[in-house]
Image: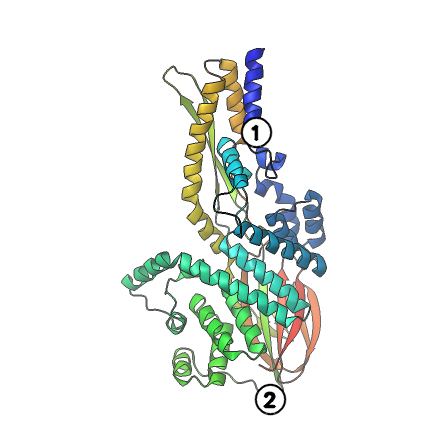
C-alpha cells in the first residue's frame, strides 16, 4: 500500500509542476484541434453564431482564444466583441513580448511540459498570426470608418512583416539562389522593392493580403509614397495578381516615377485609366478555413538492462496538405470577379510548422528520457507500477496542435472598373446592393464559408 502511495505522490508531484494556468483536462488528455472541432465545423458550414457560441462556452481567455473569438465574432457581425477580443489578444501579445528571456512561469511550464506534453507550455504566436491580428484589428477600424485607427494597425502589421523577413533572410536568399540556378529570373516586384526573389518561400513568409490592404489605405489617405512602397512589396510576393499590378502602375504614374512606370508598363502593359462615368470596385475575398493540424502518434517500448520497461508515446503535429477549396466567381452587376491570389494561409501555417518541428522533436526525445527517469525512481522493478506509468504516458502524450484555426484558407483580390450607380453583388445565392458615384473607388470585402458569405463595402474616395 505504501508503494502505491509513493507512486501516486510522485505522479501528482509531476503534475504539480504545471499546476498553473496552462493545466486543464483538454490539454492534459487531448489536444487543441480536437477541442476546437465543433467551432471549426460550424465555421466551415458558415454558421457563425454557432461557432461563436462554441467558443464562448469554453470561456477561453487565453491569447489563442482571443484570436479565435476576435475573427469569428467579426464574421458574426458582432463588431464590438470582435474589437474587444482582438484588443485583449494584442495586450496579451505585448505582455508575452515584454517577458524576461527567462521567467519563473515559463520555467515551471517548460518543466511540466517535459514531464507531460507540449500543450502545457505558454502559447507563442507565429509571425503570420501576429500579422493577421493587426490586419483584423485594421478591418474592424475600417468597418467603423476609422481610417486613422486602421492605418495605425497596418503600420504595426508591416513591422511584423519586416521582422519576419529579417529573421528568415538567410533562408530567403538561399531560395533565391536556388531559383537562379534553375534559370528563373527575378520578378519585377522583387527588383523594385529589393526583396529576395524566393518564389513560394517568400509567399509563405510575407502576407500579400496585408501589403495590398496597406497600400490601398495609404492611397486613400493620399500618402502615395507609402502606398507605392507597399504595392511594390505586394508585387514581390504576388507578382501575378492583376489588382496589385494595376495599383502599382496607378500610383507610379501619380508620383511621376518615369523609370519605374516604364518598367511596369513594359512588363504588364499600359496603365488602365478609369473611364468617365465608371467606378473602381476593389474586391477582397477571403475563402474557406485554414487547415487544422492533426496528431501523429508512435508507441515505443523501452527496456533497461534488467528487461524492465514501459511504453512511451511520441506525438507530433502535422498538416495533411488539404486541397484548396474552389469557389464560383462572385458577380457585380454581371461583371465577374474570380480574383488572383493574395495569400495562401495554409502555406504560411505549414511553413511555420516546418520551422518549429526540429525543436518539437528534440523536446520529445528529452521528454522520453525524463519520463523514463521518473518511472525508474518511482516504479523500479514493480510490474504494476510500470503498467501504471505506461497508461499515464499513453493518455498524457498529446501533440501540440495549437494555431489560429479560424483564419481563412486563402484570400484573393481583384479590381473591377464598371459603370457607376446602383450595384448588386451576387455571391453564393446572396445579393448585396450598394451605390458608387462616378469616379469613386469602393472596397468590397467578402468572406465565404459554406453558403453564408459575409459582405460589406466602404468608400475609399477618388483613387
Helix, strand or loop under label 2? loop
Left or right, residue 122 beside residue 174: right
456 or 192, which lies in front? 192
Q: Residue at x 44, y 41 (%)?
A: 360
Task: Count the numbered circles shown.
Answer: 2
Left or right, residue 382 beside residue 55: left
**Residue located farthest toward the top when viewing the structure as drawn:** 1
Binning the other alpha carbons within 10 Å of mark 1 as few (below 14), some (14 to 19) or many (20 upward) gives some
**Residue located farthest toward the left when viewing the structure as drawn:** 181
Image location of residue 359, percent across then percent down: 42, 42
Image location of residue 447, percent across then percent down: 62, 62
Q: CA distance from mark 2 to mark 1?
A: 71 Å
Residue 183 in the image: above or below residue 17: below
Helix, strand or loop under label 1? helix
Residue 254 in the image: above or below residue 331: below
The residue singled out by tag 1 in the image is: 15
**Does label 2 or label 1 sit earlier along the sequence?**
1
Q: Residue 260 lies in what quarter of the image?
A: bottom left
The residue singled out by tag 2 in the image is: 276
Q: Is residue 60 in sight in this rendering?
A: yes
Left or right, residue 38 beside residue 291: right
Quarter in which the C terminus is drawn = bottom right
Binning the other alpha carbons within 10 Å of mark 2 as few (below 14), some (14 to 19) or many (20 upward) gives few
Amino acid at each position: 500500500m505504501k508503494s502505491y502511495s509513493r507512486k501516486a505522490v510522485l505522479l501528482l508531484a509531476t503534475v504539480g509542476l504545471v499546476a498553473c494556468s496552462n493545466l486543464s483536462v483538454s490539454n492534459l488528455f487531448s489536444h487543441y484541434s480536437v477541442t476546437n472541432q465543433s467551432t471549426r465545423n460550424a465555421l466551415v458550414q458558415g454558421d457563425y453564431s454557432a461557432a461563436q457560441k462554441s467558443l464562448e462556452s469554453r470561456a477561453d481567455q487565453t491569447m489563442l482564444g482571443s484570436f479565435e473569438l476576435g475573427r469569428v465574432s467579426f464574421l458574426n457581425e458582432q463588431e464590438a466583441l470582435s474589437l474587444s477580443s482582438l484588443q485583449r489578444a494584442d495586450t496579451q501579445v505585448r505582455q508575452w513580448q515584454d517577458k524576461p528571456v527567462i521567467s519563473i512561469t515559463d520555467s515551471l511550464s517548460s518543466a511540466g511540459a517535459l514531464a507531460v506534453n507540449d500543450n502545457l507550455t505558454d502559447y507563442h504566436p507565429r509571425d503570420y498570426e501576429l500579422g493577421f491580428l493587426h490586419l483584423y484589428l485594421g478591418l474592424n477600424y475600417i468597418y467603423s470608418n476609422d481610417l486613422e485607427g486602421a492605418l495605425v494597425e497596418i503600420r504595426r502589421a508591416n513591422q511584423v512583416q519586416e521582422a519576419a523577413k529579417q529573421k528568415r533572410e538567410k533562408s530567403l536568399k538561399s531560395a533565391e539562389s536556388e531559383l537562379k540556378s534553375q534559370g528563373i529570373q527575378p520578378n519585377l516586384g522583387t527588383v523594385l522593392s529589393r526583396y529576395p526573389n524566393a518564389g513560394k518561400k517568400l509567399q509563405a513568409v510575407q502576407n500579400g493580403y496585408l501589403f495590398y490592404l496597406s497600400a490601398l489605405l495609404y492611397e486613400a489617405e493620399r500618402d502615395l509614397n507609402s502606398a507605392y512602397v507597399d504595392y511594390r512589396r505586394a508585387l514581390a510576393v504576388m507578382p501575378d495578381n492583376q489588382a496589385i499590378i494595376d495599383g502599382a502602375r496607378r500610383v507610379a504614374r501619380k508620383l511621376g516615377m518615369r523609370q519605374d512606370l516604364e518598367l511596369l508598363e513594359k512588363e504588364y502593359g499600359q496603365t488602365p485609366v478609369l473611364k468617365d462615368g465608371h467606378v473602381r470596385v476593389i474586391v477582397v475575398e477571403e475563402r474557406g478555413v485554414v487547415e487544422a493540424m492533426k496528431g501523429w502518434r508512435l508507441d515505443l517500448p523501452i527496456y533497461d538492462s534488467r528487461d524492465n520497461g514501459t511504453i512511451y508515446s511520441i506525438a507530433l503535429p502535422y498538416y495533411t496538405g488539404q486541397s484548396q477549396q474552389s469557389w464560383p466567381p462572385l458577380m457585380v452587376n454581371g461583371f465577374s470577379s474570380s480574383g488572383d491570389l493574395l495569400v495562401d494561409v495554409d502555406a504560411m501555417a505549414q511553413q511555420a510548422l516546418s520551422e518549429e518541428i526540429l525543436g518539437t522533436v528534440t523536446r520529445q526525445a528529452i521528454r522520453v528520457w525524463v519520463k523514463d527517469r521518473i518511472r525508474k525512481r518511482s516504479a523500479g522493478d514493480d510490474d504494476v507500477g510500470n503498467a501504471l506509468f505506461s497508461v499515464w504516458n499513453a493518455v498524457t502524450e498529446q501533440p501540440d496542435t495549437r494555431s489560429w484555426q479560424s483564419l481563412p484558407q486563402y484570400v484573393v483580390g481583384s479590381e473591377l472598373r464598371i459603370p457607376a450607380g446602383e450595384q448588386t453583388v451576387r455571391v453564393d445565392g446572396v445579393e448585396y446592393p450598394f451605390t458608387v458615384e462616378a469616379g469613386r473607388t469602393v472596397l468590397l470585402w467578402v468572406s465565404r464559408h459554406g453558403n453564408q458569405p459575409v459582405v460589406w463595402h466602404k468608400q475609399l474616395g477618388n483613387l
